[in-house]
Image: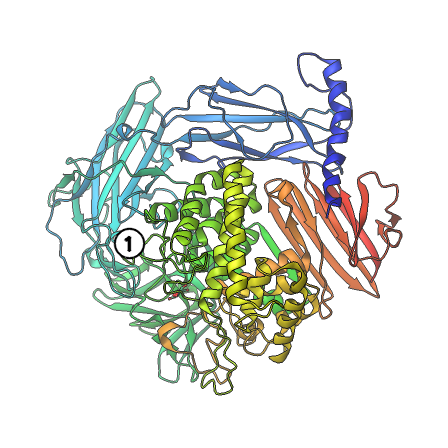
C-alpha cells in the first residue's frame, strides 16, 4: 500500500507555502505573518508525560503540549519554549521550525538542570496560517536529588526490639521548630517497606503503598512532595509509619518472607527555603524517636489488624510526649539505588456504597458492593472498648449464595479492628484486597449502608480511552476490561489482585499491553516496569516470569512471557510515539533475542519448559479430543520470530543498520526452521489449533501463497466449534484481528458476540464485572473451576479490547506517525452491531471515531486532533457515494481521495471534525 504516504506531502506542501513567506518577511525568524483568524490555544503542558511533576531525575526532560483549535486543518509549523529558574530564563529554544509538539527534549547544550530546583516553562507555537499563539500558562517541573551525595538523611530503623511474629508497624517521629518565614519546603521520602508520612497531623500527599514496587536492590523510588503549606512557624512534627509491604512481607504462594531484607527502614529529608534566602534541611537520623501504635499487623495478602486502643493520639503533631518512645538506629544501607518516581502513584479512586446487605444461607452477614474491585473498605463503627470487628473479602458467592474464599488460596484477605470505644472510622494502610463482597463479623445490631463504603485504589493513570456500542453485553465486556486493568495496575502490572500471588507476570502484561494503552495513559507505568525487566534480566538475557523477580534464580524464559521485554517497549512506542523507550530497552530486547538464539539448535528454539497457550480450552474428561492443545515449541518458535522482528523494528527506528541486517538474516533462518519443523508445504500446521494458525498468521510465519488457505483452516476450525474460540493466553489477543485481516471480520464478530462457554460474553452473562482468569471460572451450573487457580480478576483475556478499538471502531496509528501523529481510521462493522464508537486522548488531543448504520446508510463521525492527520477508510464502492456533512467530498480542501482497497475508499484528511455518510 503506497497511497497513505501522500498524507505527508499534503502537510508539507502547505508548510512550504507558509515558510518561505515567513522567512522572506522577517529574516530574524518565524513570527506572525498574517492577520488570519486563527484561534489556537496551547494546553495540557506535560514534562516527562506528567503534569507539573515534582522530583524527576531525567536531566534532559521532554516537554509536550497540545494545540487546541476550533477549525480544521490546523498544525504547528514552529514552537518556542522558555524554561525559567527563579523567573530568569535559563533556556530559550528560540523559534524552531518544527511540527514536533510531543516530547521535545531539553537540550544537552543548555544550562544543566540542578538537583531539587523547581523550574517553570511555557511554550508558544506558530500554526500553518502563520498565526503565533499567546504564550501558554506556566507549567512547572522540579528536579529530584540527582546525586547520591544530595541525600543528607540517614536510613533509620526503630531503636526497640521488634516482635518478630506480628511485626507491628513502626512509627517514627521528629519535632522541630521553625523560626523564620518559609518560602518553600520539599519532602523527599522513601522506605524499605511501605510508608505513610504525616506532618502536623495531616497525611503527606494522596498516594498509598509508596514508594511503590521496583526491583528494590537495584532501583528504589523516592517521592517528592511540596509540603510548604503543611509546615508552620513555631513547633512542627513529622510522623511516619511503615508497613512490611513487598520489601519483607509474605510474598508468593511459596510464602517467602524478607525477600529484600529483614528490617524496614525510613529515609526522609525535608529541604526548607526561608524568605531571607537561607536554607535548612531536616533529615532522618538518630535524633528521631520510634515506637509502635495501633497497626499491630499488616501483610499484603493477609490484611491488617488495627487495635485502636493502642493508638498514640497526637503522635504526629507537635507537643506530644514521646518520653517513653525508643530512639532510632542509623543503618548503613545504600543510597546508590535511589531513583526518582517515574510513574503515577497508587491513589484512591471510585467509591462504592453497598448495593445489598444480606444474610447468607450459612448465616453470614455479607455486603455486596456490586463491583469486583481492588482496594479496601472504610468502616464507621460504634462499640465498646475491646470489641472486635472482622472484615473478610471475596470476589464471588458460591452456588448456594454463601461467601466463597477458597480461590484466595492462602491469602487471608482479612482486616480486623479492635475498638477503643465510641464512634470510630477504620481503614487499612499497607494491604489491599480484590473483592466484591465483604463478610463482616462483630457488629452489634444492623449494619447501615452509610457506615461502610468500598474504595478502589490503582495507579493514578489518566483514563484516555472510551468504547461504546449498540450491544449492552459488549459494553459490559469493555467495563470488565477496564476494571480488570484498574485492579491489576497497582504500581506494577499484576496477574491478579486477590490470592497469594499478585505478581508482575510478564506474559499477562505482554498480552494486555496494547489494550491497556487504549484505556489509560500507561506510558510511564510501563516505562518504569520495563526498566525493572531489564534490571532483573540475567546476564544471559533470560527474562524472569515475574518482574520484579521474587521467584528465585532465573534459568529459563517461557515463550510469550519473556517477550514482554520486546513487545511492551514496541507497543508503548507505537501508542505514545516515544523513541526513548526503544533506546533505553534496546539492550534488554537484544539480550533476550540472543538468549533464544544461544539456546536454539539449528535455529529452532525447542528446549526448556514453557507455559504454552496457557489456559486454552480444555474440556473436563476430554474424551472426544476437543481440547485445543498447541505444541509448545511451535508457539516458542513463533514468539522467537516475533521478538526478532520487534528488535529489527526497533533497530530501524534507532538507525542501527548493522543490527537490522544481522537480525533480518537471523529472521529468515528462524522462519525457515519453523516451516521445516512445524508446517507442510501447503501451510498445514502440526497443531491443528486456532492458536497455532493465529500465531503463524499474525507473525507472518507462513509464505504468502499459503496464508489464505491457512486462514481458511482457522475459520473452519472456529466453525467446527460452533463459532467458539479455543485459545488460551497467547492465541487470544490476536484471534479476532487475524480473522479481520484475512477477510473473516464477520466471524470475528460472531466470536465477540458468542455468549456460551468458551467466549468473552459467557462470563458477562454470568454476571462478571471484571475479566476472569479462566473462560469457565464459574460453570453454567454455578459451580467453580478448581480453587487452586481461579481468579475472577485477571486481565489477560481482556486483550480483545485492542480489537474493539482498533478494528471494530477502527482507531489505529501508522508507523510513519507513531503516537497518532498519523492515525488510521478504518471501521469494521459487524452484522449484529448497529453502532460503535471510541475515543482516545492522544498526546495531540482527542481522536475519535463513531459509526452508525441506519436505514442502509452508514454515518461515520471522525475527529482528528490538531497537529495530526489521518488516513480514513470509508466502506463505500466509489468516492462519489460518500458525502461529508451532506456535501460531496470532492472539492473539500482538507480531504484528498487516495484510492480504493477491498471494500473501502481511502481518504487523507487534515485535523478537524468530519461527518461522513454513504450507502451501506
Ligand atoms: C498466573 C498467571 C501466569 C501464570 C503462568 C499464574 O499463576 O496467575 O496469570 O501468567 O501463572 O503460568
Residue 418's x, y, as percent?
Answer: 24, 64
| Residue depicted at x 53% and y 77% | 766
Q: Nearer the viewer, residue 166 or 905?
A: 905
Residue 474's x, y, as percent?
Answer: 62, 67
Q: Is residue 874 left or right of residue 41?
A: right
Residue 249's x, y, as percent?
Answer: 25, 57
**Extreme-top residue of the structure:** 27
Residue 52's x, y, as percent?
Answer: 48, 34
| Residue depicted at x 42% and y 85% | 400
Q: Is residue 325 left or right of residue 720?
A: left
Q: Nearer the viewer, residue 4 or 488?
A: 4
Q: Quadrant of ligand 1?
A: bottom left
Can residue 479 be seen in the rendering of this structure? no
- Determine crowd level at label 1: few under 14, some 14-19, many 20+ residues with C-alpha closer than 10 A: many
Q: Nearer the viewer, residue 319 or 910?
A: 910
Q: Is residue 317 left or right of residue 508?
A: left
Tag 1 residue = 245
Q: Is residue 284 left or right of residue 666?
A: left
* Quarter of the image that includes the C terminus: bottom right
| Residue depicted at x 65% and y 31% | 99
Mark 1 falls on what kind of element?
Answer: helix
Image color mode: rainbow
The vertical placement of 140 against 893, above or below, is: above
State whether label 1 is within 8 Å of ligand 1. Answer: no
Q: Nearer the viewer, residue 675 or 156?
A: 675
Q: How many marks?
A: 1
Can residue 845 be seen in the rendering of this structure? yes
Amino acid at each position: 500500500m503506497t497511497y497513505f504516504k501522500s498524507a505527508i506531502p499534503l502537510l508539507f506542501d502547505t508548510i512550504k507555502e507558509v515558510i518561505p513567506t515567513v522567512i522572506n518577511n522577517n529574516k530574524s525568524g518565524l513570527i506572525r505573518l498574517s492577520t488570519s483568524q486563527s484561534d489556537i490555544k496551547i494546553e495540557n503542558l506535560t514534562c516527562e508525560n506528567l503534569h507539573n511533576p515534582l522530583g524527576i531525575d531525567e536531566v534532559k526532560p521532554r516537554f509536550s503540549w497540545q494545540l487546541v483549535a476550533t477549525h480544521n486543518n490546523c498544525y504547528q509549523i514552529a514552537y518556542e519554549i522558555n524554561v525559567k529558574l527563579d523567573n530568569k530564563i535559563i533556556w530559550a529554544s528560540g523559534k524552531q521550525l518544527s511540527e514536533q509538539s510531543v516530547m521535545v527534549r531539553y537540550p544537552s547544550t543548555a544550562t544543566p538542570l540542578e538537583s531539587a530546583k523547581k523550574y517553570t516553562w511555557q511554550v508558544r507555537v506558530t500554526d500553518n496560517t502563520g498565526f503565533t499563539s499567546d504564550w501558554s500558562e506556566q507549567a512547572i517541573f522540579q528536579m529530584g536529588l540527582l546525586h547520591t551525595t544530595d541525600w543528607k538523611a540517614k536510613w533509620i530503623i526503630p531503636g526497640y526490639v521488634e516482635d518478630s511474629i506480628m511485626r507491628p508497624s513502626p512509627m517514627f517521629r521528629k519535632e522541630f521548630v521553625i523560626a523564620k518565614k518559609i518560602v518553600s519546603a520539599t519532602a523527599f521520602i522513601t522506605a524499605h517497606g511501605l510508608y505513610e508520612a504525616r506532618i502536623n497531623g495531616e497525611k503527606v500527599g494522596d498516594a498509598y503503598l509508596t514508594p511503590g514496587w521496583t526491583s528494590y536492590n537495584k532501583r528504589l523510588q523516592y517521592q517528592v512532595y511540596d509540603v510548604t503549606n503543611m509546615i508552620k512557624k513555631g513547633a512542627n512534627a513529622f510522623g511516619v509509619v511503615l508497613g512490611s509491604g513487598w520489601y519483607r512481607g509474605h510474598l508468593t504462594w511459596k510464602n517467602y518472607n524478607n525477600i529484600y531484607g529483614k528490617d524496614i527502614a525510613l529515609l526522609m529529608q525535608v529541604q526548607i527555603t526561608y524568605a531571607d534566602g537561607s536554607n535548612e534541611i531536616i533529615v532522618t537520623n538518630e535524633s528521631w524517636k520510634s515506637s509502635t501504635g495501633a497497626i499491630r499487623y499488616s501483610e499484603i495478602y493477609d490484611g491488617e489488624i488495627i487495635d485502636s486502643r493502642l493508638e498514640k493520639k497526637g503522635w504526629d503533631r507537635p507537643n506530644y510526649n514521646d518520653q517513653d518512645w525508643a530512639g532510632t538506629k542509623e543503618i548503613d544501607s545504600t543510597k546508590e539505588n535511589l531513583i526518582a518516581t517515574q510513574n503515577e502513584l497508587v491513589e484512591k479512586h471510585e467509591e462504592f456504597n453497598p448495593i445489598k446487605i444480606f444474610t447468607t444461607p450459612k448465616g453470614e452477614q455479607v455486603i455486596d458492593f456490586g463491583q469486583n474491585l481492588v482496594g479496601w473498605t472504610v468502616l464507621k463503627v460504634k462499640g465498646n472498648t475491646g470489641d472486635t470487628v472482622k472484615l473478610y473479602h471475596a470476589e464471588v458467592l458460591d452456588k448456594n449464595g454463601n461467601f466463597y474464599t477458597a480461590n484466595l488460596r492462602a491469602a487471608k484477605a482479612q482486616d480486623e479492628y479492635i475498638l477503643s470505644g465510641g464512634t470510630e472510622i477504620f481503614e487499612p494502610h499497607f494491604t489491599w484486597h480484590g473483592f466484591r463482597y465483604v463478610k463482616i463479623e462483630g457488629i452489634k445490631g444492623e449494619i447501615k449502608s452509610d457506615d461502610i463504603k468500598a474504595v478502589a485504589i490503582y495507579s493514578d493513570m489518566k483514563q484516555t480511552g472510551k468504547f461504546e456500542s449498540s450491544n449492552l453485553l459488549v459494553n459490559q465486556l469493555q467495563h470488565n476490561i477496564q476494571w480488570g486493568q484498574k485492579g491489576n495496575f497497582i504500581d506494577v502490572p499484576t496477574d491478579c489482585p486477590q490470592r497469594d500471588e499478585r505478581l508482575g507476570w510478564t506474559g499477562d502484561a505482554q498480552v494486555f499491553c496494547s489494550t491497556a494503552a487504549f484505556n489509560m495513559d500507561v506510558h510511564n507505568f510501563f516505562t518504569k516496569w520495563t526498566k525493572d525487566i531489564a534490571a532483573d534480566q540475567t546476564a544471559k538475557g533470560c527474562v524472569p516470569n515475574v518482574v520484579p523477580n521474587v521467584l528465585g534464580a532465573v534459568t529459563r524464559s517461557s515463550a510469550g512471557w519473556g517477550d514482554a521485554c520486546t513487545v511492551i517497549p514496541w507497543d508503548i512506542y507505537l501508542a505514545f510515539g516515544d523513541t526513548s523507550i526503544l533506546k533505553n530497552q534496546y539492550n534488554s530486547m537484544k539480550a533476550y533475542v540472543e538468549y533464544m538464539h544461544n539456546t536454539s539448535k539449528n535455529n529452532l528454539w525447542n528446549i526448556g519448559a514453557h507455559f504454552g497457550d496457557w489456559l486454552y480450552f480444555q474440556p473436563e474428561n476430554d474424551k472426544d479430543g476437543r481440547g485445543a492443545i498447541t505444541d509448545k515449541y511451535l508457539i516458542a518458535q513463533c514468539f522467537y520470530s516475533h521478538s526478532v522482528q520487534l528488535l529489527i523494528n526497533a533497530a530501524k527506528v534507532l538507525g542501527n543498520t548493522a543490527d537490522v541486517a544481522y537480525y533480518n538474516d537471523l529472521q529468515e533462518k528462524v522462519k525457515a526452521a519453523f516451516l521445516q519443523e512445524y508446517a507442510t508445504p501447503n501451510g498445514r500446521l502440526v497443531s491443528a489449533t486456532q492458536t497455532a494458525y493465529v500465531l503463524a498468521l499474525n507473525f507472518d510465519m507462513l509464505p504468502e501463497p499459503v496464508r489464505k488457505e491457512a486462514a481458511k483452516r482457522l475459520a473452519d476450525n472456529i466453525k467446527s466449534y460452533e463459532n467458539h474460540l479455543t485459545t488460551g493466553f497467547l492465541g487470544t489477543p490476536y484471534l479476532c484481528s487475524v480473522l479481520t485481516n484475512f477477510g473473516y471480520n464477520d466471524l470475528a464478530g460472531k466470536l465477540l458476540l458468542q455468549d456460551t462457554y468458551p467466549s468473552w460474553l459467557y462470563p458477562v452473562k454470568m454476571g462478571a464485572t471484571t475479566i476472569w482468569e479462566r473462560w469457565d471460572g464459574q460453570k453454567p451450573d454455578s459451580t467453580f473451576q478448581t480453587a487452586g487457580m481461579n481468579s475472577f480478576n485477571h486481565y489477560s483475556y481482556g486483550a480483545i479490547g485492542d480489537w474493539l478499538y482498533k478494528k471494530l471502531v477502527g482507531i489505529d496509528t501508522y508507523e510513519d506517525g507513531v503516537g497518532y501523529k498519523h492515525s488510521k481510521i478504518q471501521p469494521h462493522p459487524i452484522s449484529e452491531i448497529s453502532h460503535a464508537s471510541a475515543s482516545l486522548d492522544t498526546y495531540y488531543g482527542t481522536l475519535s471515531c463513531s459509526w452508525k448504520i441506519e436505514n442502509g446508510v452508514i454515518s461515520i463521525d471522525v475527529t482528528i486532533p490538531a497537529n495530526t492527520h489521518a488516513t480514513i477508510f470509508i466502506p463505500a464502492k466509489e468516492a462519489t457515494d460518500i458525502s461529508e456533512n451532506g456535501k460531496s467530498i470532492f472539492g473539500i480542501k482538507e480531504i484528498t481521495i487516495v484510492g480504493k482497497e477491498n471494500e473501502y475508499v481511502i481518504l487523507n484528511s487534515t485535523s478537524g471534525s468530519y461527518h461522513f455518510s454513504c450507502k451501506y
